[in-house]
Image: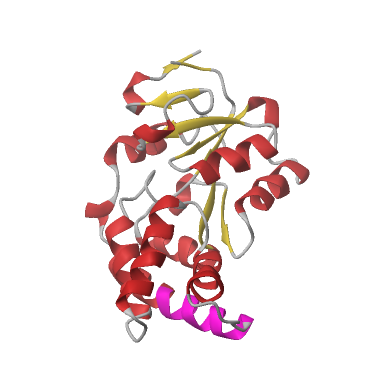
Amino acid sequence: MKFDYKYILWDFDGVIIDSDKARVSGFIKVLENYPKEQVDQLLEFHEKNGGLSRYVKFRYFFEQIRLESVSEERINDLAVEFSKIMRITLTSPKLLIEDSCAFIRENHEKFPMHIVSGSDGNELRFLNEQLGLDRYFKSIHGSPVPKIKLVENLVQAGEIDPALTCLIGDAKNDFDAASANGIDFLAYNNPTLKGLGEYYINSFTDLIFN
């Protein structure tokens, strides 16, 4: 693929780091006092909606699976507990996806790069610092702000030009965030997304620069 973009937005989970097993284990641990069949329904929702934040997923668990109301305070408490687990389990460099990380290390001076993720923003900044990746990104953004709004904020702040920007992600939610802001979507690490967006990246070594 001929790479004509000047700015790059990155998803985090599944694109920069292989975090799915840790995320699944985190949901199981945080919700261990609830019926297993209900937690299994949440995990199914999680797998189908990888780009959504944990705040959305915990609310879905209570309101759509358990059919009960839940306070914002309870959602935030669960999110904090979940984040504590992630800060321990996701700091291993062995979880990094070397294909994408090598591209980031080699090209961060050519392209201003930003992370826009459904994961918690404070947790993202912590993990990237621990993993030695934070210096490669101009900014790192996450939930509870929705991804569509995170991208919109970067556009409005003049950090990126939508016509010269791509968003690299592995979920339909990433495509939606890009499309809503007039930005090209490049799919990666999820074959079910082939045909969605401008291009499917099999490997970052396939990219050809102008």
The part of the image, by quadrant, that contains residue 46 is bottom left
Q: Compared with residue 177, is residue 144 higher up or lower down, i.e. above or below?
A: below
What count of labels does the image hold? 0
Residue ranking furthest to the right: 156
Query: How far from the left and from the top, in percent, is residue 15?
Result: 39, 43
Q: Residue at x 33, y 67 (%)?
A: 40
Query: How far from the left and from the top, in percent, is residue 125?
Result: 49, 61
Q: Is residue 27 left or right of residue 52?
A: left
In this rendered view, identify the residue nearer to me: 148 or 87. 148
In this rendered view, identify the residue nearer to me: 90 or 28. 28
Residues drawn in magenta:
72-82
Q: Residue at x 30, y 76 (%)?
A: 36
Q: Is residue 85 left or right of residue 120?
A: left
Q: Residue at x 43, y 73 (%)?
A: 83
Q: Quadrant of the N terminus?
A: top left
Does residue 91 appear anywhere in the picture?
no
